Amino acid sequence: MHTHPLERFWIYLSAGLLVVFAFAVAFSSLVLGIEIPGIEDQAVPAAAAGEYPPNQGWIRELAPGRYEVNMMTRVWTFDPGEIRVPRGSTVTFYLHSADLLHGFRIQGTTVSLMAIPGQVGKVTYTFTTPGEYPFVCHEYCGVGHHLMSGRVIVEGN
Ligand code: CUA
């Protein structure tokens, strides 16, 4: 069968790109260790359970420089809204939603998750540079969406 040289060129180019993309996915996953944030756990949304606990967020120090944060989102607050850790701390966030879909994006970091009712999102980040890291809700969640924010303060010099 005769294939026009130009057509053959595009066939090879398309196939070559697929190989390149497959290699890029394999490389980022196996070598660089980049993963899509996974679903850590399931939970009954507090709103569905008919309760709005006034305070379900907490920060716990597991060891020097290692923290766990239980982050509760609801219209239109983060709980806790302010997190203070020393420089170099590794913080694991467990993200919950008490009502509807929210976002959790810490500026200046790679942390970006959706807070899904009934699911627990998990992400770990090490704060190596001191300073203030604002976080915001980046999923539209109603009239107070733009007010939904907080900050991580990394202390030290
Ligand atoms: Cu919560 Cu937007």
Image: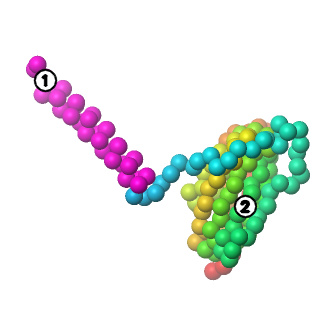
Q: Are marks 2 and 1 in contact (CB under 8 Å)?
A: no
| Disc number placed over residue 99 in the picture, else none | none
The residue depicted at 75 percent of the width and 67 percent of the height is: 60
On screen, residue 20 versus residue 80, left or right, reads: left
| Magenta region | 1-30
- In this rendering, the answer to whether 84 lies above or below 44 is below
Give the class, few, some or many, for how many residues have Cα within 10 Å of label 2's Cα (few <14, many ≥20): many
Describe residue 70's horizontal placement relative to residue 157 as left or right.
Answer: right
Q: Which mark is residue 4?
A: 1
Position of 139 relative to 2 (above/below): below
Residue 154 can be seen, yes or no: no
Residue 102, quarter of the rendered image: top right
How far is disc 2 from disc 1 in space, using C-alphas? 61 Å
Residue annotated with mark 2: 69
| Residue 18: % across, % down | 31, 38
- Give percent across and percent down for residue 62: 71, 70
**Residue shown at 61% from the left, 51% from the top:** 112
Q: Is mark 2 within 8 Å of ligand 1?
A: no
Q: Is residue 31 above or below residue 118?
A: below
Residue 17: image location, x then y, percent: 29, 39
Q: Is residue 16 left or right of residue 42?
A: left
Type of amino acid under label 2: Val
Few, some or many residues within 10 Å of mark 1 (<14, 14–19, 20+)? few
